[in-house]
Amino acid sequence: MDMIHEGKMTHDDLEDLGDICAGATPGRQNDEEIIMLSVGGMPVEDVAWGTRVYRTAIAKGIGTKLNLWDVPVLR
């Protein structure tokens, strides 16, 4: 988005990752092209990564247990 704001790219230069994965638009056209992925507003990825880190820590017996609340709000 910074490159668009700076006039180095336009919105027309962008491709949607979902469209590339679905084959609706091509990805890299040649070996000289650079692919950049900007992920914003995707908290599901944060939760997925946090889950992986948590499970790895449990499996290795490392980390510090944090008590985030005395009684959970949702039961």
Image: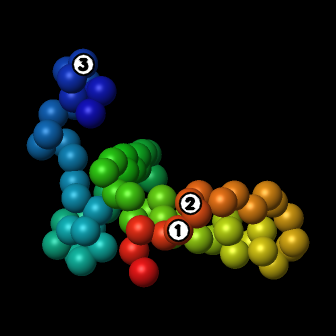
Q: Are the two marked residues, 1 and 2, in contact with CB atoms closer than 8 angstroms?
A: yes
Identify the secondary structure beneath mark 2: loop
Residue at the spot of label 1: 71
Identify the secondary structure beneath mark 1: loop
Q: Which of 55 and 25 lies nearest the eye of the viewer?
A: 55
In this rendering, the label closer to the viewer, 1 or 3: 1
Residue 63 appears at what percent x and percent y?
81, 60
Residue at the spot of label 2: 69
Image side of residue 55 versus residue 18, left or right: right
Label 1 and label 2: CA atoms lie apart by 6 Å
Which residue: 39% across, 74% down? Answer: 74
Identify the secondary structure beneath mark 3: loop
Image position of 22 with respect to 47: above or below:
below
Residue at the spot of label 3: 6
* Residue type, label 1: Val
Locate the N terminus and report the quarter of the image it occupies.
top left
Q: Are the two marked residues, 1 and 3, in contact with CB atoms closer than 8 angstroms?
A: no
| N-terminal label among 2 and 3 | 3
Q: Which of 37 and 67 lies nearest the eye of the viewer?
A: 67
* The quarter of the displayed image where residue 66 is located: bottom right
* Residue type, label 3: Glu
The residue at the far top in this view is 6
For the rendered model, the colour scheme is rainbow
- Figure label count: 3
Which residue: 53% across, 68% down? Answer: 71
